[in-house]
Amino acid sequence: MTSRVTLISPALGPSMRQARFDDGRTSLDDDGAAQARTAAGTMRPAVRVVTSPSVRCRETATALGLSADDSPDELTGLRVGRWQGLTLDDVSRSEPEAVALWLGDPDSAPHGGESVRDLCLRIGQWLDTASRTDGHTIALVEPDVVRAVVVHVLGAPARAFWRADVPPLTATEITGRSERWNLRLGHPLQATRSR
């Protein structure tokens, strides 16, 4: 049995444009939704579609013409506690040491939320379950979920989490069986039409 998971990052919205820690309730902006609609129909057919619980991931799925089967809590982005809703600039000004610690130590959670390592473990557990599911899954997920997938699939240290950039509306594909994955990194959704 072979599983294929295509992870799609959400379209642009105000939180991404402002480098704001999304609170899960922020919608896409008009440009982001239009870009997602342009990419509709470019994905390979899937047996199931899941999303992170955030509004922007669910709206991206809808704009892409996909109907999500589920929005499991396991696919929630990194929980940043009291920083939720603030911009990175705001937090860097008010808590520079905490930001430096958070970016440098994958076990730290100075915001009172979850550590990067905990996120990577949570996403790794979801992937282990997905590896026992036959067929193709499309997952519209937060960029930090994609980063955690890359760390897990490559067996990289959690410290590598911040070294992966995940542009909006890109697909990262993994295929595998028996909890062993192969990785194809973020290609623009529009590029899949030529396949």
Image: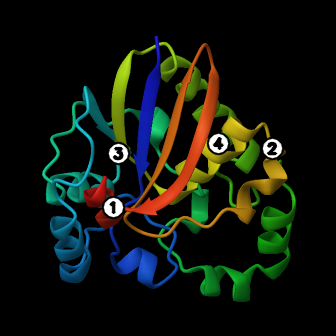
Tag 2 near tag 1, CB within 8 Å: no
Measured as percent of width and height from the top left, residue 49 is found at 27, 35
Contact check, label 2 and label 4, Cβ < 8 Å:
no
Of the numbered discs 2 and 4, the one sitting upstream in the chain is 4
Q: Earlier in the sequence, mark 2 or mark 1?
A: 2
Q: Are marks 2 and 3 in contact (CB under 8 Å)?
A: no
- Based on the displayed image, in which of its 4 quarters is residue 111 positioned? bottom right
Residues at badges 1 and 4 in contact (C-beta under 8 Å)?
Answer: no
Lower sequence index among marks 1 and 4: 4
Q: Is residue 21 above or below residue 94?
A: above
Specify whether residue 120 is in view.
yes
Q: Which residue is mark 2?
A: 156
| Residue designated by label 3 | 53
Give the answer, above or below, for where 139 lies relative to 65: above
Residue type (three-letter) at the residue carrying disc 2: Ala
**Disc 4 marks which residue?**
119
Q: Which mark is residue 41?
A: none
Q: CA distance from mark 1 to mark 4?
A: 26 Å
**Disc 2 from disc 3: Cα separation:** 26 Å
Percent position of residue 102, x then y: 79, 63
